Amino acid sequence: MPPSQRLFRLAILLLGFAALVGGTSLLAFRFSLAMGLAELQATGRHRLDLYATSLEREIDKYAYFPTTLGLEKDVLHLLTTPKPTPAQIEQLNLYLEQLNERAGTLSIYVLNVNGRVMATSNWRRPDSYLGEDLSFRPYFRQAMDTGSGRFFGIGTTRGEPGYYLTSALTNAQGTVGVAVLKVGLQQLEKTWSTVEAPALVADENGVVILASVPDWKFTTLKPLDDATRRAFDQTQQYNRRALNPLGVVELAELDHGARLVRLPKAGPEMVSMFPVAGKFLAQTQPLPGTPWTITVFSHQEQVREIAANRAALAGIGAAFLCILALMFNERRRHVRDRLAAREALQKAHDELERKVEERTADLSAANTRLQEEVAERTRAERTLRAAQDELVQAGKLAVLGQLSAGVAHELNQPLAALRTLSGNARKFLARGDQETAGSNLERIGELVDRMGRLTGQLKSFARKSTGKPQGVPIRRAVENALFLLEQRLQRAGAVACIDLPEEELLAWCDPNRLEQVLVNLAANSLDAMAGRPQQALDISARRQGERIEVKVRDQGPGLDEEARSHLFEPFFTTKEAGSGLGLGLAISAGIVADFGGNLTGDNHPDGGAVFTLDLPAAPAAAPGAPS
């Protein structure tokens, strides 16, 4: 089968496998989610019944209190007396105070037909209701119109929310006042905050008046219009609270009035025992005897996790079955191909044996040739190293050849002086003038020492170096190089300017080879300045951390672009034919590289060429070069 067809077939199998696994997982997820939501609805309805029952029981246990106050003669007498005495008011206040403490309510008070508080249980407090006009409160108007009223609001005096139960107080002449009982529902809210799902109670205006999540309280289930807000401002039902929307977003409608909603994240300081943000199943039912509704939010996360796990298991199962089917098919093909491959394997084995024998013979021959090439390369490297050493020595001898004329001239003068002084000394001795003869002999000794130093420098420069690095004083190497070029400097009228620091600079290299490099660079500088009226050779050295930098500069025409690009190539020279082989800089660069240094050449900003030697500094414990 061609590779393109195999790839196409593999792609089709992979797409089919992915479609089967994905479809199975999706069906399992939807089925499991539907089952989980049905169970969650049943649990939510049960929670709704429990919450509604607990709220009804909490309210109903106080429902009879306002009506019983109409049976108290002192209450009716106070309301029917045009100008009650302070003693009557105090007596009724004490009664209401004791009744409030025993009942566990927030406050109990009595209003006349004009809505003014005539007696109250909190008469001792600075923020007592006594004497306040509460005729604007809806619970007063409900009791006056219908005989009783129920109202949830926030107190205008203390700002304390509560549930107001009211009842009209009547006698034979008719209604004489209204009894009000204010009940706090905080304990019920605390009980709700410990259950598994959050819940809230909204009044007829859609304002949340009770909630298991504190941040939800006094928010709205839907935005309020301006007319409703103006009515709240008049009745002060919520004591001018902001009443911001809770932000419930409805996602989908389900059976039996259930809805899928999303709740926004509460404030960062909110701490809850159950989730209060995300996707929820919301279920709502009215509270009997009130215009309120109660809503329970059941979190879907666990249901979705279970559905996702079941979908994953279904996908894994489908994938496992597909893999089993593929394995069975592959095994069948493998058995079929195995029989066909056995014969081909035998043929391949025979062919392999033949090729192994051929390759073994080829490898043996190649190994023999490789060993011969390695031996030849080793011999070539030894020959190259010997040739390099010979080139170094040849370069040194070439410099010595250039210095021979100067050395001969330098030695001729002392030899002539020696001849004259020795003859004079003999005559003075013959005359008996030993003092003058001794003076001549002393001068002869000085001339011999001078000739010895010159020949010693030449011998030291000419001998082959061991190449072993040591601490070499830069000052001594520079002085030795200039000593060898002294006659040439004098003939050219050149001035050597030495700029070295007071501290001794020790380079880690071979002294003889370093002197050869300096002689080559200085000789090249003198060649570059030939024919110029003023010739100056500048040699300077500085320490740069663990390196020593030596610069040799001339006052010549500098380096052109071609010379700079081929500066250190063998046999490249800018001199006239017969004046040099072009090996000096190449040999010098090789010598410096052997030290672990670097040799560069460039033009100086003020004119002329400058060559820079970058050498490693000698270790602190390394000894200096021998004298």
Image: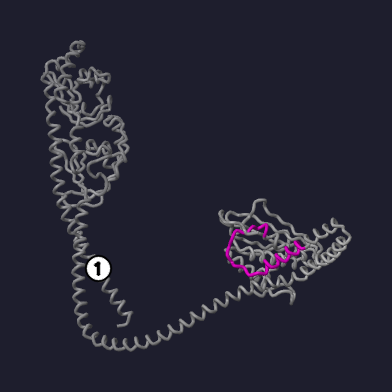
Residue at x 18%, y 31% (from the top left corner): 150
Secondary structure, magenta segment, majority class: helix
Question: Is 60 covered by the magenta stretch?
Answer: no
Given residues 530 and 105, the one toward you in this image is 530
Q: Is residue 603 visible?
A: yes
Residue at x 23%, y 29% (from the top left corner): 138
The residue that mark 1 highlights is: 19
Snapshot quadrant of residue 577: bottom right
Residue 273: % across, % down: 22, 41
Residue 341: % across, % down: 24, 85
Snapshot quadrant of residue 512: bottom right
Given residues 37 and 316, the one toward you in this image is 316
Snapshot quadrant of residue 178: top left
Which stretch appears magenta?
448-476
Q: Is residue 22 above or below residue 241?
A: below
Q: Neighbour class for label 1 at 10 Å: few (<14), some, many (≥20)?
A: few
Question: Where's the N terminus, which quadrant?
Answer: bottom left
